[in-house]
Amino acid sequence: MITTGFRTLVYKETLRFYKVATQTIAAPILTAMLYLLIFGHVLEGRVEVYPGVTYTAFLIPGLVMMSVLQNSFANSSSSLIQSKITGNLVFVLLTPLSHWEIFSAYVLASMVRGIAVGLGVFVITVWFAHLSFTWPLWIMVFALLGAAILGTMGLIAGIWAEKFDQLAAFQNFLIVPLTFLAGVFYSIHSLPAFWQTMSHLNPFFYMIDGFRYGFFGQSDINPWTSLVIVSAFLTVLALLAIRLLRSGYRLRH
């Protein structure tokens, strides 16, 4: 049964980013558009990653997924750190909501924002190349799993951080590098052997590679392998986030 408190918290978290949609939705879409114009213009006709797939077509799913991941993280992390600093987090903690409900509400709202930005990027960029939809179900599965994972990571980062510069360090030194080194702009098969091995240690790679497989039916590794790794990663992060919420780590001062 979905409680009224859970629905209210989801609504509150969704409304929080919707009220500043120019900043939370329009700005990331513009950023992805600039990436496409720059990289697509420079490398189109010079690079063919998959047989029969233009570089611009290859790039678009990567940009869509990158936008989903980064904005899902930004939503939960920024919301929690703002609530901690302003002191209104106590009103969430005092409610009879369970730790699972608090976790689910923050992550679900983050997924809504991430998917909304991803759809916006897709609608704007799809006109620049012909995209096939070989396996639509894979597209939806990896988009939802990726948004959930980054929403959970954002929640963990928001719990851990006590000020904005700590959160910025988490994003700039972990989230952004892992995203950019996950094959958004290239196939890992174009890398030297050492960096291919390092890429396989990056969980973001499996999210983007599996998502791209849904469009072209081609990927750097088997999508079922990606699905297992991504699902396991989400499970571990979710259990960690729930444990932190239950313990009150850096939440109850």
Image (spheres, rainbow, N blue to C red):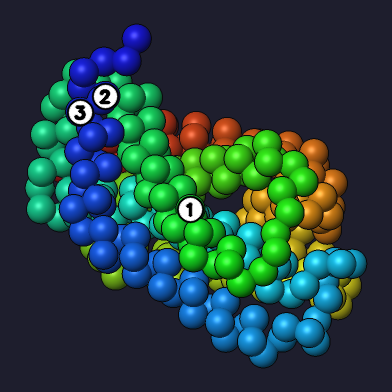
Q: Nearer the viewer, mark 1 or mark 3?
A: 1
SS type, badge 3: helix
| Residue 85 visible from this viewpoint | yes
SS type, badge 2: helix
Residue nearest the viewer, comparing 148 with 86:
148
Which mark, residue 119? 1
The N terminus, quarter of image: top left
Above or below residue 141? Residue 85 is below
Residue 116 position, x and y percent, is: 41, 50
The C terminus, quarter of image: top left
Q: Nearer the viewer, mark 1 or mark 2?
A: 1
Q: CA distance from mark 1 to mark 2?
A: 26 Å
SS type, badge 1: helix
Please tell me which residue is depicted at 34% across the width and 48% down the height of the picture: 76
Left or right: 162 as drawn, with respect to 147: left
Q: CA distance from mark 3 to mark 2?
A: 5 Å
Q: CA distance from mark 1 to mark 3?
A: 25 Å
Which mark, residue 210? none
| Residue 178 visible from this viewpoint | no
Which mark, residue 8? 3
Amino acid bearing label 1: Leu
Per the image, the residue denoted by label 2 is 6
Residue 183 position, x and y percent, is: 70, 67
Residue nearest the viewer, comparing 146 with 97:
146
Quadrant of the rendered structure where residue 250 is? top left
Residue nearest the viewer, comparing 134 with 62:
134
Quadrant of the rendered structure where residue 142 is? top right
Quadrant of the rendered structure where residue 99 is? top left
Amino acid bearing label 3: Thr
Q: Earlier in the sequence, mark 1 or mark 2?
A: 2
Q: Earlier in the sequence, mark 1 or mark 3?
A: 3
Residue 8 position, x and y percent, is: 20, 28
